[in-house]
Amino acid sequence: APGCPASGPGGMDSYTLLVAIEIAARHPLVKMMDIVEIDPTKDFRDMTSKTAAYLLLYFIKNKK
């Protein structure tokens, strides 16, 4: 993600991350989620921050 201090090639794409979050959200032992390491000074057009907000909402939506 462009807004992460340690961004680099070969990271996870957004679709794979969404699938992982959906699986984690539906697991009965998973109670919450945390997103760390977003640097707003490096975040191009707030893409990483917007994605992080979407991922948190996606987790809440899929939490059973």
Image (cartoon, rainbow, N blue to C red):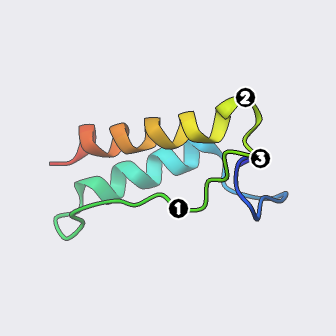
Residue sitting at x 48%, y 44% = 18
Determine the secondary structure under disc 1: loop
Q: Quadrant of residue 49?
A: top right
The residue furthest right is: 9
The three-letter amino acid code for the residue at tag 2 is Arg
* Vertical side of 27 occupied by 60: above or below: above
In space, the residues marked 1 and 3 are separated at their CA atoms by 14 Å
**Residue 56 placement (x, y as % from top left):** 38, 44
Residue sitting at x 47%, y 57% = 35
Residue assigned mark 3: 42
**Residue 24 placement (x, y as % from top left):** 33, 59
Q: Are marks 3 and 2 in contact (CB under 8 Å)?
A: no
Crowd band around label 3 with a 10 angstrom C-alpha radius: few (<14), some (14–19), many (20+): some
Mark closer to the chain start, 1 or 3: 1
The numbered disc on residue 36 is 1
* Vertical side of 59 occupied by 29: above or below: below
Relative to 37, 60 lies left or right: left
